[in-house]
Amino acid sequence: MDSDQVNGQTQGTGRRALLGAAMLGAGGAVLGLSGTARAAEAPAAGRGGRGLKSLPVPTVIGHRGASGYRPEHTFGSYDLALDLGADIVEAGDLVPTKDGHLVCRHEPEIGGTTDVASHPEFADRKTTKVLDGVPTTGWFTEDFTLAELKTLRAVERIPANRPHNTLYNGRWEIPTFEEVLKWQDEETRKRGKQVWIYPETKHPTYFRKLGLGLEERVAKLLRKYHKDSRNSPVILQSFEPTSIQKLNQLVDNPLVVLLSSATSRPYDFVEAGDPRTVADLVTPKGLREIAGYAQGIGPTLDLVIPKNADGTLGRPTTLVTDAHKVGLILHPYTLRNENPFLPAEYRKGSGADAYGDVFGAFRTYFATGIDGVFTDNADTGLLARADFLKG
């Protein structure tokens, strides 16, 4: 997920509406309850059902693993997220290789997340492409074979905020999605507890035009590993609604539409000439439409509580209530411990790598009734949830 910022469309609507209603029982029912009432309900919600209903509420999702402590989208980051207790690991922002494999990178441009710039043999691969309408310069996964990408190593993406993570630069390679699916099974056996993952299709319209469609590749692997049912521990997400609609036709997994800033337009809408913005999608009408093919939304935190001009939090919107009314769960993104990523009133000092009062921020967001949250610091999120549920 990015947080630095049809025909047959209704196929499966009945099944998905039932699943959405079931989730409303797990997550939506706690809306407006006191912390004490939430504490009484949450454990039951976390053990009484299958699939999404088996997850604790609010759910703590390890954003790209434990990316507050290790370079993102590495097995080092994924393993640590589980060690810290994350309920779900966002293992896989999925982008393709030249030879059609799916790998886990925040973006197809890998200059900032790998050591590719230090490989002279790949110097001539550096180029400028137009990615979702934005000229982008660097090295792109679709210009490398999987064997070539496996010679690279991951590095910290935001070293100014996380200088300590640079200690681990060069330690881990780029995982494939198939490796993640095998890792999920291995860790489930090892830990005696079902491991959940939350992969995302990245820039699906862009890749489909290159002949590297993502959805079919994702579905093929999920079917291969018998993880394509509605109770499978794999939630699929995308910023492009049509990608989720395609996945709805290919697999029965829980599906989530990611939502960026209110004024932005999903890139598949741009390509199709659809004038709607995210603001249109979060209206009651837009949410009803999403509920026809998905079980949840992943809004930016600003769609839940907008910020004032000075960077402090304003009044919560009606998004949580409106989404729950149509049976959608909400997993907003992304809470990070460092000052620059927090609302202004929760910052402490001015250090770019210093921690602010993130517990205060968690408490405020949890109080809106969200069903979970993406965080780079799963241990912090779990402590914040425990505090919140105590009331």
Image: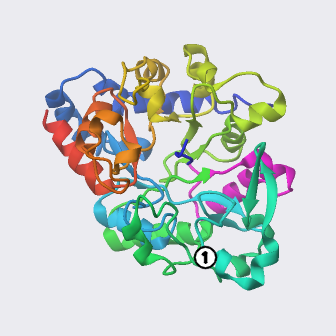
Viewer-nearest residue: 344 or 69: 344
Residue at 18% from the left image edge and 37% from the top image edge: 389
Residue 73 lies, with reference to residue 45, above or below; the image says: below
**Magenta stretch contains residue 218:** yes
Asked whether the viewer can see residue 233, the reply is yes
Q: Mark 1 points at which residue?
A: 115
Residue 296 painted magenta? no
| Magenta segment boundaries in residue numbering | 201-229
Q: Which residue is drawn at 56% across and 54% down?
A: 199
Q: Image quadrant for the C terminus?
A: top left
Q: Residue furthest front?
A: 350
Quarter of the image for residue 164 reads bottom left
Q: What element carries label 1?
A: loop
Instruction: Please name the residue shown 62% across and 70% down the image.
Output: 176
Q: In which quarter of the image is residue 86?
A: bottom left
Name the residue: 32% across, 69% down: 191
Measured as percent of width and height from the top left, residue 319 is found at 46, 21
- Label total for image: 1
**Residue 86 located left or right of residue 11:** left
Q: Nearer the viewer, residue 371 or 267?
A: 267
Q: Which colour scheme is used?
A: rainbow
Residue 335 in view here: no
Neighbourhood count class around disc 1 (C-alpha, 10 Å): few under 14, some 14–19, many 20 upward = some
